[in-house]
Image (cartoon, coloured by chain):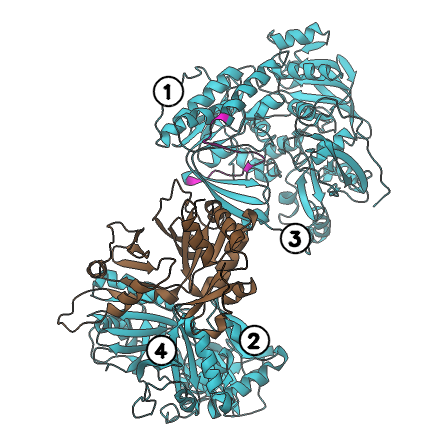
Amino acid sequence: MGALPKVFAQNQLRRSPIYRLTQAAGAFCEVINSGAVPMHYGNSDSELDRARRMAIADLSGLPRTGFKGTGTVDWLAGQGLTIGPDSNMAYRQDGGALAARLAPTEIFLIDGLEATGALIDRLNGAWNWGTEKPRKLIGYPMPRQDSHAWFMITGDAAPDMFAKICGVDLRPHKFAPGRIAQTSLAKMSGIVIRDDRGAIPAFHLLADVASAEYLWGAVLDAMSEFGGAPVGLQALRRLGEVPS
Amino acid sequence: MNAPVSYGGMNRLPNRGQFIDRSKPVTFSFEGAFVEGYEGDTIASALAANGQWIVSRSFKYHRPRGVLTMVGQDANTLVQVAEEPNCLADKRKIAPGLVVEGQNYFGSFESDSGRFVEWVSKFLPVGFYYKTFHEKRASWKFWEPIVRKMAGLGKIDPHAHHGYYDKQYLFADVAVIGGGPAGMAAAIEAAKAGGEVILIDENPKLGGCLNYARFDESGEAACKAEGDLLNAVQAASNIRVMTDAVVSGLFADNWIPVIRGNRFYKLRAKAVVVATGSIEQPAVFRNNDLPGIMLGSAAQRLIHFYGVRPGKKAVILTANDDGYAQAIDLLKIGAEVAAVVDLREVPPVTPLSFAVRKASIPVLAGHAIQEAYHHNKEHVVGVAVAPIVAEGQLGDPTASYDCDLVCMSVGYSPAAHLLLQAGAKFAYSTETAMFHPAQIPAGLYAAGSVGGVFDLDRVRADGARAGWAAAKQAGLSVGAEPVTPGDTQDRNQTHPWPIFPHAKGGEFVDFDEDLKYADLINGIADGFDNVELLKRYSTVGMGPSQGKHSAVAAVRIVARETGRDLATLTVTTQRPPYTPEKFGHLAGRIFDPERRTAMHHRHLELGAQMMPAGIWWRPAYYGPKAEREKAIREEVLAVRNNVGLIDVSTLGGLDVRGPDAAEFLNRMYTFTYAKLAIGKSRYVLMTDQAGVITDDGVACRFSEEHFYVTATTSGVDAVYRSMLQWNAQWRLDVDVANVTAAYAGVNIAGPKSRAVLQKVCTDIDLSSEAFPYLGVRMGTVAGIPARLLRVGFVGELGYEIHVPYGFGEALWDALMEAGAGDNIRPFGVEAQRVLRLEKGHIIVSQDTDGLTNVWEADMPWALAKTKPFFVGGRSTQIMAKMPLIRKLVGFTLDDPSLPCPEECHLVIRQGEIVGRVTSAVRSPNLGKVVGLAYVHPDDAEPDAKIAIKVDGGRMIEARVVALPFYDSAAKRQEM
């Protein structure tokens, strides 16, 4: 594990809604996307084991965006994205980003865990009102970077943990990779996307940013019986590289 | 606690007790004395092992009560465990240090002074409440304290700690409820189809009756069947087994609540097999409730589950083969069987009955127990036996037997509660003397003795049939249909009339409620001759066990007393839960979401007192609670005279975009927006179709096709839904996005706000000429992308600054730092309420209610004059032509000594209520009380006097004044 320079979330312009909680848990952060992202909590090897069993990571600092409205998918396809026909499915893009099709005309785009932000930045920069009359319908940008907190839940016990807070059957044989559930979690709305890391079940959890501290606590509580605890982004990256 | 006294284990049997671990002794206390048991013991089994047969006392007569079922189906064993009342002692496992007490006694458990109630029972007839409190109003005064003292079971500790309970969803293709031979066979068969099967049983181990019942003299039949079935269940990887789990209900669409430990599982299955078995029924005879008299299956459970000898000398009252099996069980543990009393005139000769006769045990056919004898009512000591001369009638006693155990095995009733809850219909069969399923809803299948099948081989076949059908129903690929068991109604299992009234009474039909045979007869004679009516009048079946042992007897008695055919009657409605469940299970983990703004922790660090706004938290004011008024006043003055900063992140935010955005707003709101210039904002007022005011805010036009519309904190979700709903009809080319949480927001307000903002906002010309009142701009503040709105809610120069949530805290920090030299002060919701009231601005839902229209709120200025339509417009026009019945006005108190009215204080006119105060404060700036109130329209003009009824009923005089109270020229906000 390479030593990280001391990065404090409160010194950054963009701050995770739960940065106090990860900081209190001993997070070591790196600046990504103008914010401090927890990379590890002191022991990357034990975090890797934990990530295989049951873990949660705060990815709220990582790039994401969204577009919705008539013309959205055509416009994104024109920008080089590959988006399949089915709603409630997430489609992998070159570079690792996932385009989550929430509805026929709504895409929630989350960056890959390398978090380069390249695609997200390009799309955010490319969208504009245009000058043609009548204006070509290309959908509208959505402030997904800030509307939703972003957690990743990993580990073999993840489906059992989800069963304590969510009524959708998220077990691997019932909820295929790429599937999306827009559902209620711990009594609040959220989006779950299955995106395994190697052979380990993994799920993105996107939910109301204003309730992020509540949800983080509720998930930690639910995963406690499985020995679940926070891990940093490094563990997730390694999870995708190392055979389990 | 008393000195340790071990009850020993004088009744513990060697080499028996499949649920206990003899290597793990456990000590707990019962009524202050230490008791030793083994891990796996229940409270009742451990007490029985130590010779403590009285477990609790009955509800009404405080009669000593002991083990009846050993399966948690009765109220005889309700005990207090620490702060938790009404625990089932025959289900609750012992644990080291567990503190257990009996319930429902006065004085001491052993010597209960509450026994006097039975002595005066003739003054407590059936229907006591109906008779006593009907017309005799004065009787309540006499009875109330007595009833209150006698009522209730157990003791609640209001200071008990909040236990940790939670919930979990479960999923399955086929759910099988009941892990006996039928349930296991069903699960095995269903699993063959490859789906997910879940097999649930309330006991610690699968097997059901195979764990305790005897189907042949050697007991090998049960052993072999259990071994075969358990092996098959274990071999099927797609069967999930849940033991120690109670299914407490069965709801629509196969929604199944399952309780195990402190967890409440919510199971949804495609098909359900109910293999819940049957409930052995007690016989009704004099003193049938004595400790030592129990169901035969309870005695077998004591022996085989816990290795406890239920008695040394037994009399068995039976009407089926099971009674003979129990006799063999007792003989095998060295107990003496004084006699088998068989209700049947000519019992069939079976291998089991033959074995009993071969053991020289007297068998009295066509006889019944006439009366049980006791020692101080603490335990049975003997029985008198008499011949049955007619249904329910006995001749003179022909024999008596000393005994310390009476096993009752006279028949069964299906454990049909779950099926009945799900809508199944059961009908009584005079052939089998039991209720049988006549109609079962689709997707549900009954298997085993719940459906009237008792023969072991046929039970297994019936289970396989049900499992196959359920798998098919679940859409799984099933093989060939298993051979059906043929005739599935076993006879000779249940006696049609095991009820034997005694001249001296004391024959209990309902143990929970201490109801005797005569009580039911009298209830019917009082005219309550329908089962449902009799239930409510007599309370039969209304106790904790919900009629599991009394319902069938009650139906039989009603049928005979009213001359009706039993086949036309049914048991009373069965409702969940099947067994008592805790509030903790229902409450679960208690998810209570809340929303916090990006600056939430900054407010806490500044000493804010937080208040809820829906599920948001907002700062009410900053400072200690004891200095609330001072803090609010100083915050108000800071805004008026200097500069203040308030977190407005909770206000709703909606991006309305598209070619038809302006038209859309024209239709949704009362004003007009088509010609609103880019870079400007305008007030929005929303009404519903009835013309009632529902929300307000501002619409900011950032481009030709983009409006950023604000809404109230509590109203934004409804506004958003309403917009989506309307546009589903209008189909305008517009997209609406609720971006409330995505944007944090502050309002920096006060004469110095521009100066402070200028320090951190350099890419926008903030001058009043370049950025006038009601202007809106996009730019950056402290390097953060921001939407800036010049609005005047608090009536001062001010800027609302909306930034992405992630930057919210940094924005707050930057502004507080920029304003430090100017003594910028954060202000909360309370100060904002004062400030806006001084300006006469309403708060929708505080100053309006579910009926307020534009005319009552005196807001016709917010109506567009020319546009053809807006939601509520037609109603608003109609109401314009109708006489007003109230009007919202500003008022003040001329007499400074008068108290400030509070919200909802009434406005009185000529003795009639004509309105109410909606807002009122003592204004720090104006030095007087100002407020808003609904008044009679004739009193709505300035200088009219109104009367307000304040605390204590005092009437005070107020004077109507023109709004606003402050800065009527509106110069300050336009600086």
Disc 1, SS: loop
Q: Where is residue B937 in the image (x, y as percent from the top left)?
A: 39, 82
Mark 1 and mark 2 lie on one chain; the one further toward the N terminus is: 1
Q: Can residue B249 be seen in this view?
A: yes
Mark 3 and mark 2 lie on one chain; the one further toward the N terminus is: 3
Q: Disc 2: which chain?
A: B
Disc 4, SS: strand
Q: Name the residue under label 2.
A: B605
Disc 2, SS: helix
Q: Mark 4 points at which residue?
A: B786
Q: In this view, does B32 lie to the left or right of B903?
A: right
Q: In which quarter of the image is the C terminus of chain B?
A: bottom left
- Mark 3 Cα within 10 Å, few/some/many (few <14, many 20+)? few
Q: Which mark is residue B137?
A: 3
- Residue type at mark 4 is Ala
Q: Mark 1 points at which residue?
A: B481
Give how far apart the Cα atoms at labels 4 and 3 are. 72 Å
* Chain for colour cyan: B
Residues at marks 1 and 2 on the same chain: yes
Q: Where is residue B905 in the image (x, y as percent from the top left)?
A: 52, 77
Display colour for chain A: brown
- Residue type at mark 2 is Glu
Residues at marks 4 and 3 on the same chain: yes
Q: Disc 4: which chain?
A: B
Front tag of 3 and 1: 1
Mark 1 touches mark 2? (CB < 8 Å): no
